[in-house]
Amino acid sequence: MSTGTELDVVSRGLANQTLPVPPQHNSVELERAYRKERLAGALRIFGRFGFAEGVAGHITVRDPEFPDMFWVNPFGVSFRQVKVSNLILVNHKGDVVHGDYPVNRAAFAIHSAIHMQRPDVVSAAHAHSIYGKAFSALHKPLRYLTQDDCAFYNDVDLIKDNGGQVVFDTALGESFASSFTKKAAIHANHGLFTSGASVEEAAFWFVSLERSCQTQLLALSAGKPVDIKDEWAAESYRINGSSYAGWLSFQPLWQDIALSDPDLFT
């Protein structure tokens, strides 16, 4: 959630204009409907960006009424075919409480542990995206080479344990979640994970981190990139790395997908 300070920083020079803010709903039913719409939209966006790899990849969002349950994309359904009506609700035992599809075992093992261990996380995202996978194979931390990279300044975990191992076992999921303490993680030989206080935030951080990995791979292949100074990176993080900044940055993506894919609401 944004703070006055964050809004002031982002909107400096726009004294006579109003920026959008995350909506506040007066019932769990309205909040649930809102979260499910954004979840379906975020998954469509992942499909549009080419983040799909067979049946791998998932975004989850905690249910506002039952915090020990989360909504997730149905197993075996294309990201670009997900809609509100085919999302499934899963509890921390792995039971599908609502919906007609099974749950991805890896999605349950990892995301269930994240939601249990991280009460601050409303939504978490993971996909087998090309540049995230490639960068994760280097076993190196993210560098701050561009302004966009600085949104992750000191806020990305590099997790090497069990890297590359298929996570079906809940113990492995719990081990990963215990190491996932920041808003994003690079899991060695696996890929990227992001989290947020909303679907919008988690989804945008994933898109942005994937692009940062792409940028760094290109820069490293072209020569010897120069890092941004720490004090400049820290200032960029303060402006562009907040929870509100992540939510706000998702809005153009949402506007586009909501207009082009109206069937996601069905």
Image (cartoon, helix red, strand yellow):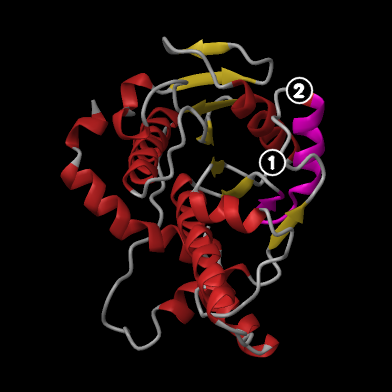
- Does the segment drawn in magenta span residue 58? no
Give the residue type at disc 1.
Pro
Answer whether labels 1 and 2 touch (C-beta < 8 Å): no
Quarter of the picture containing the C terminus is top left
Label 1 residue SS? loop
Residue placed at 32% from the left, 21% from the top? 85
Task: From this view, report whether residue 89 is shown above or below residue 28.
Answer: above
Q: Which residues are magenta?
A: 171-188
Q: Residue 207's spot in the image, x, y percent?
A: 45, 56
Relative side of 12 to 168, left or right: left
Q: Which mark is residue 169?
A: 2
Q: Residue 39's spot in the image, x, y percent?
A: 41, 37
The answer to which quarter of the image holds residue 77 is top left
Q: Residue 49's spot in the image, x, y percent?
A: 36, 50
Residue placed at 44% from the left, 22% from the top? 74
Give the residue type at disc 2.
Asp
- Tell me the distance, in whole angstroms, between the alpha carbons under discs 1 and 2: 22 Å
Q: Dot 1, how many residues are within 10 Å of its Cα: few (below 14), some (14-19), or many (20+)? A: few
The answer to which quarter of the image holds residue 93 is top right
Would residue 5 be visible to someone looking at this image? no
Q: Which mark is residue 119?
A: 1
Q: Which mark is residue 153?
A: none
Task: From this view, report whether residue 110 is shown above or below residue 186.
Answer: above
Mark 1 vs mark 2: which is more N-terminal? 1
